[in-house]
Amino acid sequence: MQPVILDQGPGTDTETGPAQETYRRPGRPRSEQAEQAIIEATLDLFAEKGFEGVCVEVVAARAGVGKATIYRRWPNKEELLLAAFASLKSPLPEPKGVSVRDDLLAMVEVMCADKADPRKARRYALLLGDGDKYPRLMARYKETVVQPRRDAMRAVIRRGIETGELRPDTDVEIAMLTLTGAIMAQEKDGTLDEDFAVRLVDGLLQGLAARS
Amino acid sequence: MQPVILDQGPGTDTETGPAQETYRRPGRPRSEQAEQAIIEATLDLFAEKGFEGVCVEVVAARAGVGKATIYRRWPNKEELLLAAFASLKSPLPEPKGVSVRDDLLAMVEVMCADKADPRKARRYALLLGDGDKYPRLMARYKETVVQPRRDAMRAVIRRGIETGELRPDTDVEIAMLTLTGAIMAQEKDGTLDEDFAVRLVDGLLQGLAARS
Amino acid sequence: MQPVILDQGPGTDTETGPAQETYRRPGRPRSEQAEQAIIEATLDLFAEKGFEGVCVEVVAARAGVGKATIYRRWPNKEELLLAAFASLKSPLPEPKGVSVRDDLLAMVEVMCADKADPRKARRYALLLGDGDKYPRLMARYKETVVQPRRDAMRAVIRRGIETGELRPDTDVEIAMLTLTGAIMAQEKDGTLDEDFAVRLVDGLLQGLAARS
Amino acid sequence: MQPVILDQGPGTDTETGPAQETYRRPGRPRSEQAEQAIIEATLDLFAEKGFEGVCVEVVAARAGVGKATIYRRWPNKEELLLAAFASLKSPLPEPKGVSVRDDLLAMVEVMCADKADPRKARRYALLLGDGDKYPRLMARYKETVVQPRRDAMRAVIRRGIETGELRPDTDVEIAMLTLTGAIMAQEKDGTLDEDFAVRLVDGLLQGLAARS
DNA sequence: CAATAATCGAGACGGTACGTCGCGTCTTGGG
DNA sequence: CCCAAGACGCGACGTACCGTCTCGATTATTG
């Protein structure tokens, strides 16, 4: 019967940057500490027990926080998870523009490294290979993490065609899907991760067909 | 109403192989009909309402079956879903052995077609981008659906190297990951599915590098 | 809608006594209304359909309450039933102290009346002769309802001996068991309830033995 | 769809005695051993774990018997329990007819002894004092065990009135309820069981009122 | 001796209720 | 306006028994 609490307190989480004038909503400001503790607890729980282990009630308890403090910030568990994952994002390197092979390699190496970082690995592993009960989450993950990377990669390939480094009839989408897909498809326990990036980029550049 | 005579018999489904003589466990055999009805109901519910809609209680009601009859066969909801999905598997075509390109193309086409079949598409779509929260289901899905396909594809590539159709220094794993990964990574609402397979196979065969 | 201010507060119901200062546990207090509604629904269902009819799920639905709200208060169905029955207790009249016969009669009459009151009668009838399957409920019932009444009755008899109204060699326990037991043993559909109390008390006072 | 199995095999349990001519239904006769084992298992389980512990499935397992073998004999769990209890019945002694006091005493002593016998005690305790979730069962118990005893007792009292041993204005029903009720009401852990019977009978014979 | 018939054990069947868990919301008193 | 705590309604989960229904095998009596 009480009016629904509208999430319009100081510092709504849709704010992506500081407002122009230093405007401050009335009332007690949200605790930055609480926010951090929640994210950390979420990430820890996820790393420990996977998706199932991330229960809002447990996160709250571990972060020493009330459930409402979580729901004041994120509308549901999924967004919480997503926010937690987002805090792990490692940005792709800016292409240096010297050689397409080098730029692609740098990108692929960063993406492979993500699977090695223990914390991100868990995210990767669970999302893509171990227990993926959260496809909607995965969609969002793709949207916010995978897609931007693809776009960057697409740009590099396009530039390669323009510079003549790549075949002029290169199928950009296919090339891009091939690279990102291969990383995605590779099993996390792959045996020789160190030079996987090199093999992948070079393999793709050369093609499979025997040159007669 | 009469159960089929070749019923697998009562007992745990952990049976890994048929006994030597056609052994029959004591007690009333499990109803093959019930099993079918359950799988169908599961698939229907999934197609209708996605993951969330697949509640064991609803499946049981729709299949005209007690919950225990479900739990007697599968230990939890996840395994039920998996079994249901498994019943959708479309086997890869046997490689004809004429040309590697044709064999690969046939395989890729089947895999692409899976994403077009409404029922399987839904599985794919929900698993990879829509549904909600089913962790290790996808792992099992990969294990039972994706992995076998990869194995088949690997075999074709290996044969291509032997016949000289593919470069002798082809990196088999990379090639295989590239193909399957690209299909996986392709968005389900891809606009030009019809020739995607051709583009993918040919793109990979030719490579990206400009021939100087 | 507002919970009564003297709500017992949230927390386990194992609290055996009130804290010194009116201590209030943190968190939202338990709704007194919900408690009432649950008890009422339980009693209604019991009156309507007997023991079998008292299903926690139905009680919850009828009380407009979640199952958890019930299980937060009582650990199981049995305790719920007991609590519901306890709320029906009709206290024994205070002995007026004029004559033992009158005091006993008043007590017996109240106890007999309980078997006439439709709601309490149902409890009695079902517990002792009709319902189905609730083991240790009756024990608790006796503990909380029967025993206190016996204690009160015992006190009256003791006083009667002191005042000389009863034989000095009266066996108090026997007398008390005799009275309460007879009421207990009497069939619920007894045809002449109105003067049963008088007959019982007088019968006991006079004894059976012919006076030679 | 199959016709219901009618319980008309050899030796339907409605047979209360051997038929006149030694008629024997065709087919395999019911195993007397199984019947014994079932009853024993029921009684054991009851003694061990009370009402709750008596699950038909457990009884069957413990007796080394199929569930159908139980349900072929008794229509439901309640009847099984009742049959088991019935096998414990200890008949009242025939009144010797010398003195009413002696006859009553003998009867009361037997009834008290029932509460001492470990096996019967459990039945008594659970039915009347410890865990009585089965009121319908208790009704049947009263019907088949308690009621016959009351009838016998009533007969003795009536004879006492005729012989002049008891007051001519004795209220037979009250007297009878008083005796049986007191035994029923007495707690099983009563402190001095040995002479309880004497105290009860004598207490009732003398009455409580002081003789002025 | 073969046929018939009812038994036996085992265990699956459709149901119903249980008690638990987690979600996202609401409501306390106190910063 | 925020905070920690914790109750709320809801709804799915997986378990436990109930009483019934097959199975193949066994055991008597009848023809």
Image: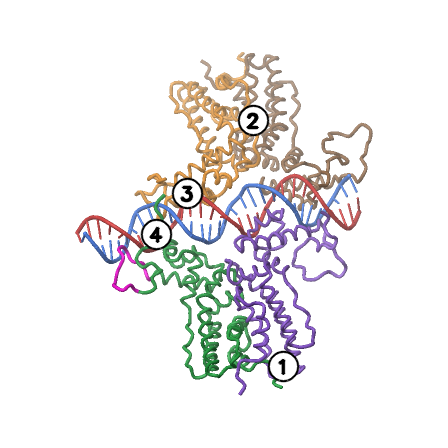
Chain colours: A brown, B orange, C purple, D green, E red, F blue
In the rendered view, would you say B197 is above or below C169? above
Q: Position of residue D198 (x, y in %)?
A: 51, 81
Subunit that carries the residue with mark 2: A
Task: Name the front one of labels 4 and 2.
Answer: 4
Q: CA distance from mark 1 to mark 4?
A: 63 Å
Subunit that carries the residue with mark 1: C
Q: Position of residue B98 (x, y in %)?
A: 38, 18
Rendered residue at 46%/63% (across/down): D140
Q: CA distance from mark 4 to mark 2?
A: 75 Å
- Under circle 2, the secondary element is helix
- Under circle 4, the secondary element is loop
Q: Both on one chain, marks 3 and 2?
A: no
Q: Which mark is residue B13?
A: 3
- Under circle 3, the secondary element is loop
Q: How many marks?
A: 4
Q: Which mark is residue A197?
A: 2
Q: Position of residue C201 (x, y in %)?
A: 59, 75
User: Does the segment drawn in magenta span residue D22?
Assistant: yes
Rendered residue at 65%/37% (across/down): A76
Q: What are the residue bounds of the magenta stretch?
A: D18-32
Task: Name the front one of labels 2 and 1.
Answer: 1
Does residue C7 appear to the left or right of A125 in the view shown?
right
Between A178 and C188, the one nearer to me in the picture: C188
Subunit that carries the residue with mark 4: D
